[in-house]
Image: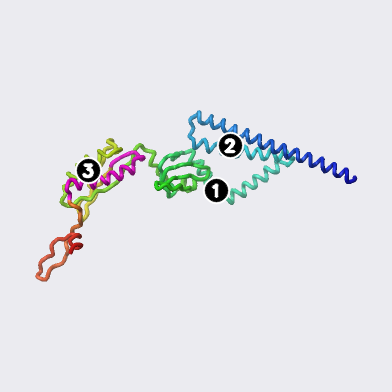
């Protein structure tokens, strides 16, 4: 065989290989368009069945990845590569990756459970995995939570699923817990009636259940009242701050004295007389 024949054979092989490469590129582009089209059709079908949007995204991501793996195997078969051997190699690689990335797979499994059991949805205000905020996305491996101070925090799904989850948006209302300190000379019944009347006028405070104002404790300054209005979670902080302001303004308008701690000093003067009761302010001003 001379050089001319060798050149012809090489040219023929290169031509065949080039045609296969062009065919593989065309197959990849066409298949990608078909996969995207199929995913869009599935998305429309899922939406028509009123399926949870988070679950739709989760399923479509899995379907899209699976179809692309099948496409890669098909292209390799197009080039004459033994796909059964490749499948075995892929399985072995999957085992090795699974052993190395056990935490990642645990997050994937936890994400699946979060989608199936749905302890919370996108838009819910939750406390999970040590983070409190509004859920913006439930992904394959992580969940995105926007905290009240507007910091986007990414939390691993396994950490969320393995910990306690508090969903503040699950119930139609929640309770605001505050306290009000009374001076020891103030009539607690009068103060309770005053606060119940004023707090019920705060915007977004619910009438049913009605706000609770009751004695919760006693200290050296006097009686301590538990002040507990109810509201929807969306209005929690507005009601929280407005209630604090209402307590301060109501007691000021009623002329209640400022609470101060009173106690008796267990000592005697030089002539044996007891020292009278004193307040903390007495020592500050002297």
Q: Residue 242's image quarter? A: top left
Q: State the residue in front, 150 or 208.
A: 150
Secondary structure, mark 2, is helix
Q: Is residue 245 left or right of residue 118?
A: left
Q: Dot 1 corresponds to which residue?
A: 104
Q: Nearer the viewer, mark 3 or mark 1?
A: 3
Q: Pick the residue in front: 180 or 103.
A: 180
- Numbered badge on residue 195: 3
Mark 2 lies on residue: 63
Q: Are marks 1 and 2 in contact (CB under 8 Å)?
A: no
Query: Residue placed farthest to the right in the image?
Result: 1
Sequence-earlier tag: 1 or 2: 2
Q: Is residue 227 above or below residue 269?
A: above
The residues tagged by marks 3 and 1 sit, at their Cα atoms, a distance apart of 53 Å
Kindly state the secondary structure of the residue where label 1 is placed. helix
Q: Tell me: 239 left or right of 158.
A: left
Residue found 64% across the figure and 40% down from its top: 69
Tell me the quarter of the image containing the C terminus.
Answer: bottom left
Mark 2 or mark 3: which is in front? 3
Q: Which residues are magenta?
A: 229-256
Q: Residue drawn at (64%, 47%), measured in percent from left and top? A: 93
- Packing grade of label 1 (10 A; few <14, some 14-19, many >=20) is some
Quarter occupied by residue 2: top right
Gap between marks 1 and 2 measured at Cα: 19 Å
Residue 256 image point, x, y percent: 17, 49
Under circle 3, the secondary element is: helix
Specify whether 264 is left or right of 53. Answer: left
């Amino acid at each position: 065989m001379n050089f001319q024949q060798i050149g012809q054979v090489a040219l023929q092989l290169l031509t065949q290989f080039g045609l296969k490469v062009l065919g593989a590129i065309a197959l990849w582009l066409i298949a990608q368009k078909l996969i995207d089209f199929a995913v869009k059709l599935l998305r429309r079908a899922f939406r028509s069945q009123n399926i949870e949007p988070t679950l739709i995204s989760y399923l479509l991501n899995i379907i899209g990845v699976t179809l692309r793996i099948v496409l890669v195997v098909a292209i390799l078969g197009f080039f004459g590569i033994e796909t059964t051997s490749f499948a075995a190699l892929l399985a072995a690689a999957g085992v090795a990756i699974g052993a190395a990335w056990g935490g990642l797979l645990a997050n994937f499994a936890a994400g699946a459970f979060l989608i199936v059991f749905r302890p919370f949805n996108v838009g819910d205000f939750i406390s999970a995995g040590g983070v409190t905020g509004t859920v913006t996305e439930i992904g394959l491996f992580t969940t995105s939570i926007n905290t009240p101070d507007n910091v986007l925090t990414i939390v691993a799904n396994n950490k969320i699923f393995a910990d306690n989850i508090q969903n503040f948006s699950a119930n139609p209302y929640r309770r605001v817990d505050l306290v009000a300190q009374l001076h020891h000379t103030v009539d607690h019944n009068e103060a309770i009636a005053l606060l119940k009347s004023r707090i019920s006028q705060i915007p977004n405070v619910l009438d049913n259940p009605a706000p609770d104002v009751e004695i919760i404790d006693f200290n050296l300054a006097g009686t301590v009242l538990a002040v507990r209005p109810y509201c929807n979670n969306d209005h929690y902080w507005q009601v929280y701050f407005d209630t604090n302001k209402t307590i301060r303004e109501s007691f000021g308008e009623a002329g209640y004295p400022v609470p101060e701690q009173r106690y008796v000093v267990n000592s005697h003067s030089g002539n044996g007389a007891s020292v009278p009761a004193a307040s903390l302010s007495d020592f500050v001003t002297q």
